[in-house]
Image (tube, rainbow, N blue to C red):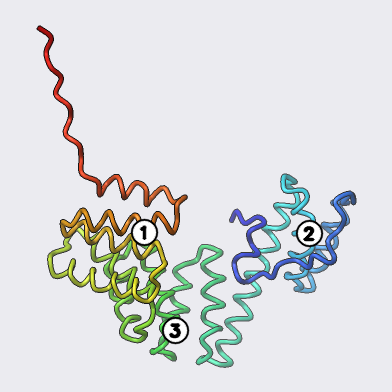
C-alpha cells in the first residue's frame, strides 16, 4: 500500500486535531515518535497513532521513516476495522453500516474478493438496500465485469429511482458496449437523461449523455451538451477532447500546383 497524508480522506480516519499540532519550529525526535506510536498501536489506539504521525508528516513530508510508520499504522488500523466490523456483523447481521465498514477496509487493503463476499452476505439480510448493491456494482466494474455490473446497477435503479449514479453508470456501460444496438442506445439515453434530471449540474452525467447523443449521430446536440460540461468543469481535459471528437472534421486544403 502507498497511503500517505490523504488517508484522512478515506472516511475511516478523522482529521488530526490541529489544536495540538506542534509548532513548525519544533524538532521531532524520531526515536521518541516511533516509541509513542508503537505504544499507541499496542493499545489498539490506531486513530490516535495516525493523528500523531499526521501532525508531523504535514511538516516533514519527505521523511521516509515517518511515511513508512504511517503506512504500517494505517494497515493496523484497517486490520482492526475488519476484526471489529466482523464481530459487529455477527452481533447484528441486519446493520448495513457494519458490512460497509468491513468491505471498505478490505478494499483499502486490496482484498476485493473478500470485500465482495462480505457485501453479498449483507445482501442476504438486506436485499432491498441500494447502498450495498452499489458497492457490489463498483467492485464488478473494478474487476472489468461490465455485464454483471450493469445488472446490479439496474437492480439499484429498481430499488431507488433517485440514484443518479446508478442511472449514469448503467447508461455508460450500455453505450460503450461493443454489442450496443439501437435498443440498447435508446435505453442508455433514457438512463442518462434520468441522471441529468436528478443532478443537472453534474458534468460527468452530461458527458455521458453527450457521448450517447453523438453515437446516435447528432453531432450538434453532442457539442451543445459537452460545452455545458466544459462550462461546469473547465479544467477537465477529457471534456475538451470530447469537444474535438464531436466537432466536424475540416477537409484538407488542396494546394494549387505552380505553373
> Which quadrant would the N terminus be assigned to in this image?
bottom right
Does residue 36 appear to the left or right of 94 in the view shown? right
Does residue 116 appear to the left or right of 84 in the view shown? left
Does residue 137 appear to the left or right of 91 in the view shown? left
Q: Which residue is tagged 3?
A: 121
| Along the viewing direction, whichever of 31 and 62 lies nearer the viewer | 62
Q: Which residue is tagged 1?
A: 228
Q: Residues within 10 Å of mark 1 (few under 14, many from 20)?
A: some
What element does badge 2 sit on? helix
Q: Is residue 97 above or below residue 248?
A: below
What element does badge 3 sit on? helix
User: Residue at point 33% right, 59% down?
Assistant: 207
Tell me which numbered mark, 3 or 2, is placed earlier along the sequence: 2
Q: Which residue is tagged 2?
A: 55
User: Residue at point 69% right, 70% down?
Assistant: 14
Q: Position of residue 191 (x, y in %)?
A: 27, 73
> Which quadrant would the C terminus be assigned to in this image?
top left
Mark 1–mark 3 distance (CA, rounded to whole Å): 42 Å
Q: Is residue 141 above or below residue 255?
A: below
Amino acid at each position: 500500500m502507498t497511503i500517505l497524508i490523504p488517508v484522512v480522506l478515506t472516511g475511516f480516519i478523522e482529521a488530526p486535531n490541529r489544536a495540538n499540532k506542534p509548532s513548525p519550529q519544533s524538532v521531532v525526535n524520531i526515536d521518541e515518535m516511533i516509541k509513542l506510536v508503537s505504544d499507541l498501536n499496542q493499545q489498539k489506539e490506531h486513530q490516535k497513532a495516525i493523528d500523531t504521525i499526521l501532525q508531523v508528516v504535514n511538516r516533514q513530508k519527505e521523511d521516509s521513516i515517518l511515511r513508512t510508520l504511517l503506512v504500517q499504522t494505517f494497515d493496523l488500523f484497517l486490520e482492526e476495522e475488519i476484526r471489529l466490523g466482523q464481530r459487529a456483523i455477527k452481533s447484528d447481521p441486519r446493520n448495513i453500516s457494519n458490512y460497509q465498514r468491513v468491505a471498505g477496509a478490505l478494499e483499502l487493503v486490496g482484498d476485493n474478493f473478500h470485500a465482495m463476499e462480505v457485501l453479498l452476505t449483507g445482501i442476504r439480510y438486506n436485499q432491498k438496500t441500494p447502498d450495498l448493491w452499489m458497492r457490489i456494482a463498483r467492485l464488478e466494474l473494478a474487476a472489468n465485469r461490465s455485464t454483471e455490473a450493469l445488472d446490479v446497477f439496474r437492480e439499484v435503479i429498481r430499488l431507488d429511482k433517485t440514484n443518479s449514479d446508478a442511472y449514469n453508470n448503467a447508461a455508460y456501460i450500455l453505450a460503450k458496449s461493443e454489442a450496443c444496438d439501437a435498443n440498447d442506445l435508446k435505453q442508455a439515453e433514457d438512463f442518462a437523461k434520468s441522471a441529468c434530471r436528478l443532478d443537472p449540474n453534474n458534468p460527468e452525467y452530461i458527458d455521458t449523455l453527450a457521448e450517447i447523443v453523438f453515437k446516435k449521430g447528432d453531432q450538434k446536440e453532442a457539442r451543445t451538451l459537452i460545452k455545458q460540461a466544459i462550462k461546469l468543469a473547465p479544467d477537465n481535459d477529457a471534456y475538451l477532447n470530447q469537444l474535438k471528437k464531436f466537432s466536424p472534421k475540416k477537409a484538407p486544403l488542396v494546394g494549387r500546383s505552380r505553373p
